[in-house]
Amino acid sequence: MFAFNFNKITMPIFYGKAALIDFLNSVKTSHSTIGFVPTMGALHQGHLSLMQQSLAENNTTVVSIFVNPTQFNNPEDLEKYPRTLEADTQKIADLDKNIIVYAPSVEDIYEGKTVSQEFDFDGLENQMEGKFRPGHFNGVGTIVKRLFEIVTPNNAYFGEKDFQQLQIVKKMVSKNQLAVNIIGCEIFREANGLAMSSRNERLSKIEREQAAMIYQTLLEAKEKFKTQSCEEVKNWVKEVFQSNSIFDLEYFEIADEATLLPCVEQSKNKNYRAFIAVFVNNIRLIDTISLK
Ligand code: PAF
């Protein structure tokens, strides 16, 4: 059973897991695959590109739209997170009406106990986002595991903008021996280089233009990393942001992609990546770049 809820949009939208599970059981065969794109809605081109990849690689594509309360350490951020289900559904329908949307309630997911499971991600959770957003990755692990149990995807697609999340999801999958491939997808950027994010909607036009500096600084940091030490590059980035009052830099880090441990001295055997979190008028933006 599915609901055709919004005027003019005829596509399957499930609000409850029982009906979704029944439906997926009815379409699954031993040769078919399910691709899954978990989202918190407020969809942008970055999300749509994940869906396109899933459509190209699977027989069935499921997209979840759920603002997961347990991954927000800041109640104001949770309250202000954009909720635009009707517009989101329209964007999905415009892309492909065969995509299956799962837009559950908190009750459907948490069944009266809106709490996170405790995970051990071998220390990946203690760096960067984990340091500044206590409990965040337990919330992410909890919801992603729950959604995987419901959707039973063969392939699941995550954007590389949240690179730490991507590594954590891979760790959760390998530790729990879940039969799902985790596929990291390139960051989608606005024309000025700003990484696409649902939070960009909260920026004014001028702030959105100014925020382009985040990516420009990452590109310059990448250049400097060819000849300078980790410490020198980190200090340079801090100075850049200190001298610009519209930004409040939370962290800039250079870390080993595999362990996410901060770079102390460059080693040739490691792949490094720069990570940044910065506030623009109280709106928290993150970005990342490979330093290879
Ligand atoms: O990246 C996100 O949008 C969320 O963290 C996710 C993976 C959908 C879990 O709520």
Image (cartoon, rainbow, N blue to C red):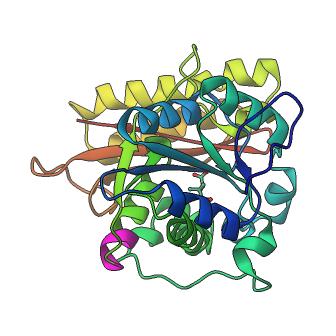
Q: Quadrant of ligand 1?
A: bottom right
Q: Please give left or right for residue 35 compared with residue 202 in the image.
A: left
As drawn, 180 above or below 125? above
Residue name at image x 33 percent, y 30 percent = 222
* Residue 173 is inside the magenta segment: yes
Residue name at image x 53 percent, y 20 percent = 193
* Residue 282 is inside the magenta segment: no
Q: Please give left or right for residue 16 compared with residue 35 in the image.
A: right
Residue name at image x 46 percent, y 70 percent = 125
Quadrant holding the C terminus = top left
Residue 45 lies in quadrant: top right
Image x and y of residue 140, in percent = 57, 66
Closer to us: 117 or 126: 117
Q: Magenta part of the protein: which range? A: 172-176
Closer to us: 238 or 103: 103
**Residue 84 visible somewhere in the drawing:** no
